[in-house]
Amino acid sequence: MRICNLASGSSGNCTYVETERARVLIDDGKPLAYVLNALNELGVAPDSINAILITHEHSDHIKGIEKFARAFNIPIYAHTYISEILFHQLPNCRHLFNFFDSDFDLEDLHIQPFPVPHDSKYCVGYRLSEEDAVASIVTDIGTFTDVVFEAIKSSALVFLEANYDPEMLMSYPNYPPFLKKRISGGRGHLSNINCAKAIERLVHAGTRLVVLSHVSEHSNTENLAISTIANYLESKNIIPNVNVRLDIAHHEQRGTIFRITPTSKK
Ligand SMILES: [Zn+2]
Ligand SMILES: [Zn+2]
């Protein structure tokens, strides 16, 4: 499996995942030209994409979908619980929708959606597997629940939200109080320290690579997220770059290309 974040954060999210026979995008909240350029850098023809999977209906995850999906006739997959809302928000894509309410396969890629507490109509994370090579994506998560942990534990690679630093969030002058409350609430976004605590559990369950994702443009920085999380993990005797590798999904720049190989193909 080859997997690479193309963009992350409230200005737009998109992640590319490829197996031997399947190519998918998870969310698309970026302009068409941006995504085409990022795919071109990866050597991927846009019309070779098999599907776009939606996590939830917030605009930073879907606002690029209409143009991309219609330009290349790409099927769109989303949970049945958000079908009505998507018919409304992406009215010109009705003929491309496929709705799921449980696990499904696209070629050799097995997709297991699971519910995530977030203040959209309904939000899922995805566990993605090619045989025993497993990666999971969980962004926009107010609380790292046991349901989420059970769904993604033993993933080799996890894209996990590290959204905000509480002090930066509370002192940011341009957010009204209700928005600060929403972000830091149990159905909002995950703070650096709560992300660190989640990583601690994941490392004990076998995860060796975590990509800090959906980092806020206003109430966090990449360096602060990394240092806060690394310090917490060290205090728990989990040594970054020894016991777990931490990487970052950037706002407007393609991230690291990761490869996870099934045992049968090693
Ligand atoms: Zn988001
Ligand atoms: Zn959201």
Image (spheres, rainbow, N blue to C red):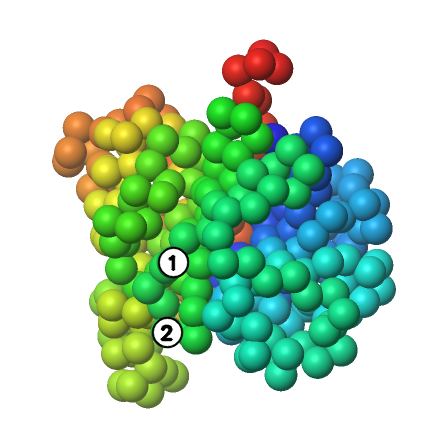
In this picture, residue 66 sits left or right of residue 198? right
Q: Quadrant of residue 19?
A: top right
Image coords of residue 10 (percent x, y): 50, 68
**Viewport quadrant of the C terminus:** top right
**Viewport quadrant of the N terminus:** top right
Q: Considering depth in this image, is 195 or 234 the residue closer to the camera? A: 195
Residue drawn at 70 percent across, 80 percent down? 91
Q: Which residue is mark 1?
A: 115
Q: Is mark 2 within 8 Å of ligand 2?
A: yes
At label 1, the amino acid type is Pro
Residue drawn at 82 percent across, 60 percent down? 73
Q: Is residue 254 above or below residue 142?
A: above
Q: Is mark 1 within 8 Å of ligand 2?
A: no
Image coords of residue 55 (percent x, y): 51, 60
Residue drawn at 75 percent across, 48 percent down? 49
Image coords of residue 205 (percent x, y): 28, 30
At label 2, the amino acid type is Asp
In this picture, residue 266 sits left or right of residue 154? right
Q: Which residue is mark 2?
A: 119
Q: CA distance from mark 2 to mark 1?
A: 12 Å
State whether residue 229 appears in this view. no
